[in-house]
Image (cartoon, rainbow, N blue to C red):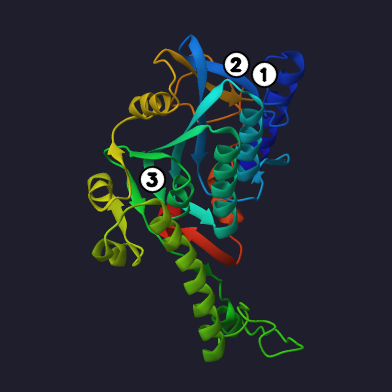
Amino acid sequence: MKNVKFAVLLLILLTSACVNPKINIFPDTTKPLKEYTLQGKGKGKVLMIPVRGFISDAPGGSIIGSKPSMLQEIVSQLRLAEEDKNIKAIVLQINTPGGSTTASDILYEELTRLKQKTGVKVVAAMMDLAASGGYYVALSADFILAHPTTVTGSVGVLFLSPKVVGLMGKIGLDMEVSKSGKSKDMGSPFRATSEDENKIMDALIRELGARFLNLVVQHRKIGEPDLVQLATGRVYLANEALAVGLVDEIGYLEDAISKAKSLATLPQDAKVVAYRRTKFPDDNLYNTTLTAAAGGKLKLIDLDFLDSFTSMRTGFYYLWLPAIEE
């Protein structure tokens, strides 16, 4: 009965969309990015870029198709910023538990290259969460600001590999694998990991973890005792993060924008802009979406909450795993 009601509701909404063109059930993520001014009228621009959600190169899902990945969306914005000589600073609005090692590293590298090529200044503004891969990306910034209630840190790497061997044994299933070498199916979910394979995996994890920690050492001035604690992968609240040197200041988003203008020698009335695919009514700094169901438009089903789970394949992650449960 519920399925019938849902089908009727969907039919009504689709029919309404045909009659009233203002209703757009499924927001269009194929529209080109356009610049919108959030505040200011002076010379020069500060670009706001949200780094929100699971960091991945995997596209997001919907009931009718896919949307660009976080990596694709941010790189698209960086390419537009590179072409606009009036953009002198970027504020990264970071709210993420991290994500894949590769996607995190690519974002860090893209931001670093943009800074070297254009001289643009980058400020990282941490919101609720800037952990693991989120902090990795923030290391590309010239200045890191944390909100008073930010959780950050979690410097380190995870290897995630689901195991179904116990379940298969309970239901009487088995998987037979023929392989060219003893380690060819290392990490297989269908069998237990051997001691030799654990040693190999530990070496890979140590190398990726050291890469992260070395970037921290390169960009931040952190004493040896605090560095030892940092290497455990623990998280920090903003005041602790400031004390050990993970961040430069505690403040609010407006403070991050003011700092970006100062670093780029822009006037305080310089424009603050963002790239959107849709015009938003009453737009402001805290809008972190690019596409909206606005102006009478209805977004029928939002599957964003599933993106982090569908993006998490077997592999290595700069990720604070507990935050994924949210």
Can residue 2 be seen in the rendering of this structure? yes
Q: Residue lying at the far top in this picture: please name it.
A: 41
Q: Nearer the viewer, mark 3 or mark 1?
A: 3
Tell me which label, 2 or 3, sits earlier in the chain. Answer: 3
Picture quadrant where residue 1 is located: top right
Element marked by disc 2: loop
Q: Position of residue 239 (x, y in %)?
A: 23, 45
Residue beneath disc 2: 296
Residue denoted by label 1: 23
Q: Quadrant location of residue 6? A: top right
The local crowd at label 2, few if under 14, some if 14 to 19, many if 20 or more residues have their Cα within 10 Å, is: few
| Mark 3 secondary-structure assignment | strand
Q: In terms of sequence position, does the residue under pointer 3 or pointer 1 come before the other?
A: 1
Q: Nearer the viewer, mark 2 or mark 3?
A: 3
Residue occupied by mark 3:
129
Q: Give whichever of 117, 100 is nearer the camera.
A: 117
- Image spot of residue 92 (x, y percent): 47, 36
| Amino acid carrying mark 1 in the image | Ile
